[in-house]
Structures are given as C-alpha cells and as structure tokens.
Amino acid sequence: MIDFSEIVERTHKVIERIKRINESHHYFNYISEDLAITQAEKLKRNPHGKLAGIYVSVKDNICVKGIPSQAGSAILDGYRPVFNATAVQRAIDEGAIIIGKTSQDEFGFGTFSTNTGKGFRHPVNPFDHERAAGGSSGGSAGITALADFPHISLGESTGGSIAAPASFCGVVGLTPTYGRISRYGLIDYASSLDKIGPMAKTVEEAALMLEVVSGHDMKDSTSIDAPVDDYVSYAGKSISGMKVGIIKEAFGKGVSPEVEDAVRAGISRLSDAGAQISEISLPFTSRHCLSSYYILAMCEASTNLAKFCGMRYGAHAPLEGNFNSYFSKVRSENLGEEAKRRIILGTFARMSGFRDAYYMKAMKVRTLIINEYKKALQGIDALVCPTMPILPPKFSEIGKLSPLQNYMMDIMTVGPNLAGLPHISVAAGRVGKLPVGMMLVADHLEEKKLITLGSVLQ
Ligand code: GLN
C-alpha cells in the first residue's frame, strides 16, 4: 500500500533521481517537475484511482497539456499543447503522476533512437553506455529499466517502436491492436499504423496501464468501440493447452545465434508451462513486410509532416521571400536528415505516375499480409519470434549502417504492425549483461492472451 501522506516528498525524490539518471542516460527531453508536484499535492488531499501514486513517463510525441511535446523535433520548438492526449488524460484521471517526456527518434523515424532531432541527446542502453537503447521509444524503455520507484511509461509504435526498445532494455513492451487506445493527442507519424502502448517492468503493470487507457474515444474515429477486458486478471493464469506457433522464417539467416538460443529457451519455458508448440510459416509476410511497411509509412509521414511549415506550430523564422522559400527554410533548418529522407521518398512514392507502382502496390501487399496472419492465427493463440534479430548494437556499429541496412533491423516487428495485431515483447534472457527480447503476436483484440503468455516468461 502506498502511504499518501508523504507522496509530495517522495515525488521530489523521484524527480531528483530522474534528473540524475538523465545526465548520463538522456531518457527525458523534458522533466515535468512542477506538474508532478501539483499532481502529488492533489493526490495527497484525495488519493484515488488505479494508478494512484504511480509515476508515468510519456513519449515526447504524446501531448501533455502545458508541457513541451515535440516528438523529439526542433520543428516543434516552443509547442506546448493546450490539451492532454486521451491516453494521458485517462492515466491522470486514475491518479498517475506525469514525470516527463521521453526521448525518441525524431517523429519516430528510427529503430535505435539515434535519429534524434536537432538539439536532442540520444538515450543510451541502461546496461552498456556504448550501445543503443532501441527506438523509437528509447527513452521510455531506458527509464523503465532503471526506475527504482513505481513507474510505467506510455510509448508509441508505428512499426516496432515499443517492441524494439523493450527488447534492448529488457523490459515489457505491449503494443495493442490498432485502435484499442485512442490516438487523439498523438503527434502522427503514419496514421494508419500508429499505436500508443504501455512499457513497464512487469506484464502486470503493462496490463494495468492498458486497462486504464484503452477504449473508445469520440475524439478518434479509428478507436475501436469494443469493451475493455480486465487485462490485469489475465496475468498469471494457466497457459496449459494454449497454442503457440513458432514463426519458421524468424530463425536462421540474419538472426544472431545468441538471440536465437535465448528465444528458444524462452519457448521451452512456455512449453514446460503447458503450451502446445508448433511451427507456422509466414512466407509472404517475411518476404514483403519491410518493403510494404517502408513505402506506406513514408507516404503517410510525408503528408503528416506537411503541416510543420513554420506557420502553425513550433519553430518559425522572420518572414522573408515567398511562402515556398519560407517553408523550405524553416523545414531545412529544423528537420533532421532522416525526416528529410522520408519526406522526399514518401512524396516520390505518392506522385502521379508512381502512385500505382508504389503506394497502391504496397497497400495491396498489406492486405495480403493481413490475410496471411489471420489464416496463421486460426486455431493458434499466439505466434512467437525474436523481437530483434541482434543484440543491442554499439553506436559505432549503427553509424556504419546504410539506411537500408538500418530498416532491415525491423524485419520481425513491421509485420504485426502492418496487420494492426497486438504484440508483446518480454525479456527471454540475457547474453552477458545484454537483454534479449522475444515477441508474441495475437489476433486482434486478444491482448489478454499476450498478457497470460507473457506473464509466464517474466
Ligand atoms: N523503425 C521503424 C521506422 O523507422 C518503426 C518506428 C516506429 O515504430 N515509430 O519506421
């Protein structure tokens, strides 16, 4: 039981602690000290809610009222939303104390949180400072690993940004079904793919946050109007008789042998606990998921980022020349290299003359991928594979990757994201001090199965 008479003092200590962690690890773009203290004072007077006294960090691309919310980009310098994202509002209504905005790849464009925007520092792996924390929700994963106080983070995934950093930092990352959690107040990367989701030390905590923030929202027409399960009650249930399919293509070439060993050991634990294990092949998805994802994600990103033109939000400059030259100046000065690359590629793939060859084709491929997953999940409770093909890489190694080699690291995670399927990454084991994550994928709205299976593994 939390003693609320000292919640304000405790909050001061937590803020001091995260400031210290931040000096060396860079998990926060902004620490919301004043907001946290105000919320703690309110809780002291009136303790209430499922998240009462839990400290919640929020990825920088999720809007928190009055707090800089920049999606890790200099182009949103000075932007302070006048509203809370629905997920944030629901967490606050249940007693959460918001401690800050976590570091990320600019707008979510990356896998290692090294594509940070101008002026931002990139998070480092909690277990080895020379290695990446994963991305794009790297700050959320890192602080989750190091928090020695009650803490849950709200991350966001478009193509794996919850699972990847969860894997590299050894924490739980739960990406829900597309539409399960409202996207209202989420700064868009690719609207048909973006999902907010919890990151936590334990499956129970992730389930608790999911329970609080899920559900239909009038402010997001893509949010699903289906009842929210009592997710927490599914943790620790027996998995006896549950059916788990190993994705055949997810092992072997391109996967580091240490990762494979750790994940196979995790699968044995599922089997020992009574799960029935079989092998499932996803040949089409394995072959085409990356190309389909990167075309669609870049197309959507290029339109979503058009609104950042130096007139409406954030960064601006003295008005000179015509609109086009002004627009280009503000964008070229404030967007990072990867953001520019994606805007250019996404715009190209949508141009008349190319649209059918790229965008429309990628959409058709996406439908076939959804169909392949739906078929595979008939009679199966979850699919399993490594979350990332490699151990957390060194920054010096990432620097040598070409953009394409970089995108290939998402081979396991983009498939379920394209299909809008819920997935969870939990630690399978460690190689030395470095964590290895394994990923379970379930059918739409079957988060409860992931919670049950995941809780066996932790
Ligand atoms: N690494 C993927 C990308 O760069 C996924 C990122 C994300 O989920 N935001 O698009």
Image (cartoon, rainbow, N blue to C red):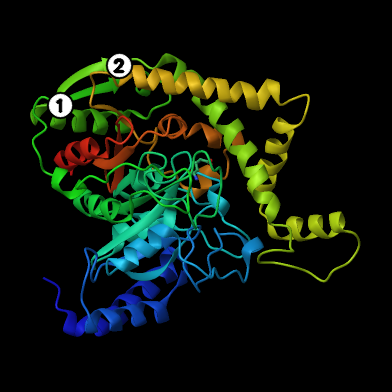
Question: What residue lies at 58% left-to-right and 41% top-to-bottom?
Answer: 400
Answer above or below: position of 300 versus 277.
below
Mark 1 and mark 2 in contact? Answer it, CB < 8 Å: no
Question: What residue lies at 54% left-to-right and 31% top-to-bottom?
Answer: 293
Q: Which residue is mark 1?
A: 242
Query: In the image, residue 446 lies at what x, y percent?
Result: 27, 35
Q: Taking the image as drawn, is residue 248 in sight?
A: no
329 sits left or right of 422 in the view? right
Q: Taking the image as drawn, is residue 283 in sight?
A: yes
Mark 1 or 2: in front is: 1
| Nearer to us in this view, 400 or 380 | 380
Answer above or below: position of 10 versus 196.
below
Question: What residue lies at 70% left-to-right and 60% top-to-bottom?
Answer: 334
| Nearer to us in this view, 286 or 347 | 347
Answer with mark 1 or mark 2, whichever residue precedes in sequence.
1
Query: In the image, residue 390 lies at what x, y percent?
Result: 39, 35
Query: In the image, residue 419 lies at what x, y percent?
Result: 43, 29
User: SS of the residue at dot 2?
Assistant: strand
Answer above or below: position of 453 versus 434.
above
Q: Which residue is mark 2?
A: 280
Which mark, by number, is residue 52? none
| Nearer to us in this view, 342 or 314 | 314
Q: Residue 353 occupies which quadrant of the picture?
A: top right
User: SS of the residue at dot 1?
Assistant: loop
Inspect the image, locate mark 2, and give the three-letter code of the amino acid beneath it: Ile
Inspect the image, locate mark 1, and give the three-letter code of the amino acid beneath it: Met
Query: In the image, residue 254 lies at what x, y percent?
Result: 43, 25
Q: Quadrant of the N terminus?
A: bottom left
